[in-house]
Image (tube, helix red, strand yellow):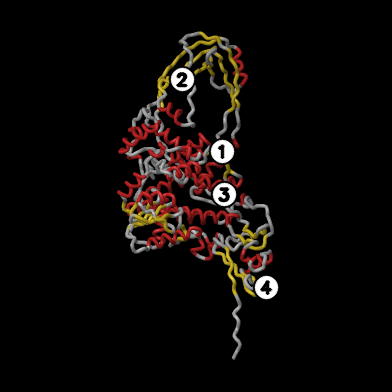
Amino acid sequence: MKLVICEKPSVAKTIAKILGAKTQKDGFLEGGGYLVSWCFGHLVELAPPSAYGEQFKRWSIKDLPILPQQWQYAASADKAPQLEILRSLLQREDVDLVVNAGDAGREGELIFRLVYNYCGCDKPVSRLWISSMEDNAIRDGFANLKDGADYDSLYRAALCRTRADWLVGINATRLFSCLYGATLNVGRVQSPTLAMIVARKAEIDVFVKAPFYTIELDCGEFSAVSERFSDKTAAESVAENISAATVCAINRVEKTVAPPKLYDLTTLQREANRAYGSTAQQTLDCAQALYEKKLITYPRTDSRYLTDDMAEPVTALVNAIAHGAPCDAGQVLCSSKVTDHHALLPTFAGVAADVTALTDDERKVLEMLKARLVCAVGEKHRYLETLVTIDANGTAFKAKGKTVVNAGWKAYAIALTEAGTEEQSSALPEIDQGQELSVTAQIRKGTASPPRCFTEDTLLSAMETAGQEEMPEDAERKGLGTSATRAGIIEKLISGGFIERQKKNLVPTAKGVNLCAVLPEELKSPLLTAEWEQRLCAVERGKLSDADFMHGISALTSGLVAAHSAPLPEYAGLFVPAPKGDAVGKCPRCGADVLERDKGFFCARRACGFALWKNSRFWTAKGKELDKSIAAALLSKGRVSFTDFVSEKTGKAYAATVVLVDDGAKTDYRLEFKTRRRAAV
């Protein structure tokens, strides 16, 4: 019997159908010699700091850095039942092979391996590695299963990434939160991303708008423009004396625009944001949904090319989308530029799909992919550019015109997607060199524009190229994060209150600006994180050991703690909020004040999450209400005694001591009863 473990239930159902596993059981499907089950994303995660010692339940600088010698793992509380189902399946005596059918990438590998290892399984593993959820791709994948050991390096890279994020995130967040008395979420990738947004806003704020002036000549059928003047009087002086002009040069050059490359995930997210205002996360979610519906290939790719053996299916796809369209498949084929997955493509099922059954956003993404494929294999766009130079009283004016010779691939960009816009004709009239023109002159005022706020389009581009100039030319991966993680980083910064969306723009909040002010340069530098991404890629390729990678991360973390033992004096009170509610005690997790609110008693540090709810079933079932005095006693002593609890079953009163139990993630209560002494005989 073969056990197939997928990343999501929807994928498991599709695979089970192909394999003939039609019998529905509790948490899996069975049939055809297969058991097909699933995860719900990460079922097993790195354990919280409290797993390494009781002292780590509280946030304290003296306990930093937290550097686990033996990493601990924990089951996700809300997903524990499915993990137990997988454990029982992995331990079944009739299961002789386990197939990892997680998404074909770092995270998919990590999700499976953590479950496999957590459950103590040592059975042989095969890897299903596919780029499409179409039936034929699944069949071919199972006919050509890979040895699971072939992906050990990929797993090690994924494990290094998640451990590095844990080390930097946990230690730096606790360090700077304790230093400045507020919850300050710090991350290996999100902090330099935030720093770029803050720096851009600072550039905008200090930009001084300087006016400039140009002279525009109305030449009848066209206009010509002078160079810029910084002084209005000088521009007016020139314009006053112009009534005629002479065409002194005409330069015509034929130019071409090569077809665009195919989409990788980041480019798709950028263009969807530019064309439709979609967020990076929305585009990723749409692409993932389309993939699971078998309509497109695997979305989390950073390649914009296809492998050399794909010429035939590419040609067939293009004919299915736009029959008769030019197709030079060789333009998009380059095996050496494809790593784990080739560029994004629609599948044959996607080309034939009834788009009315899709959401509006899904339809737009699918149409973008179809149009991009046809454009990428199309002909060059050719046009004739005419540059005319005109002399008027010794001042040069220029006019530019453009005549399309062959629309080429741009014709399909316009026809196949609503994101395309037809190019406006700007051809100049027939004129000759030396021709005299009757003209009128007019002054135009302009203002130099400040840098623009980041949009998700431009931020994704900046993340992709961050630190690029200082990275080695042969670096396999550059920038902040990966195509699969950048959308999540943006969403974390927004949910943490560090940046916000203003229409399409991403701007820092006061909290984000303040955080960047107190963070050291090594946590804000895109180069540092770009180097770590490069080193992760080296681990993935088997060129660097995971031990060497983690040694560097541990050294960075220890150095941070050692270098920042006190807040910067000028920022010491920067994050102190105005008090809200009455303090009833100190938080048992982080040491901050616990404040009374309408519904309970909550830690002042919102991210801490500690709470004692007034309407808890524990108290109402015993005829009690959690009030300020009880909460204060629980926080100061950890326990409080009662003599008048009421039994729900009998209605009788009884005595008991309530003990507060908090494991750093969940708060609960335990009852203790006095042991009665037996009378002497």
Per the image, the residue denoted by label 4 is: 644
Q: SS class of the residue under badge 3? A: loop
Which comes sooner in the sequence, label 1 or label 4?
1
Which comes sooner in the sequence, label 4 or label 2?
2
Mark 2–mark 3 Cα distance, whole angstroms, equals 48 Å
Q: SS class of the residue under badge 1? A: strand
**Residue 344, quarter of picture:** top left
Q: Does 76 appear above or below 381?
A: below
Q: Does 79 appear above or below 242?
A: below
Per the image, the residue denoted by label 3 is: 496
Image location of residue 562, percent across then percent down: 51, 56
Judging depth in this view, the residue of 270 and 645 nearest the camera is: 645
Q: Residue furthest bottom?
A: 681
Mark 3–mark 4 Cα distance, whole angstroms, equals 44 Å
Q: Are marks 3 and 1 in contact (CB under 8 Å)?
A: no
Left or right placement of residue 425 versus residue 589 in this view: left
Q: Does 423 appear above or below 516?
A: above
Mark 1 neighbour density, 10 Å: few (under 14) some (14–19) many (20 or more): some
Per the image, the residue denoted by label 1 is: 505
Q: SS class of the residue under badge 4? A: strand
Which comes sooner in the sequence, label 3 or label 4?
3
Image location of residue 584, percent across then percent down: 67, 62
Per the image, the residue denoted by label 2 is: 402
Q: Are marks 1 and 4 in contact (CB under 8 Å)?
A: no
Which comes sooner in the sequence, label 3 or label 1?
3
Mark 3–mark 1 Cα distance, whole angstroms, equals 17 Å
Amino acid type of the residue that numbered disc 3 sits on in the rendered structure? Gly
Image location of residue 490, percent across then percent down: 52, 45
Judging depth in this view, the residue of 301 and 632 nearest the camera is: 301
Image location of residue 205, percent across then percent down: 60, 37
Which of the two marks, 4 or 2, is nearer to us in this view? 4
Q: Quadrant of the N terminus?
A: bottom left
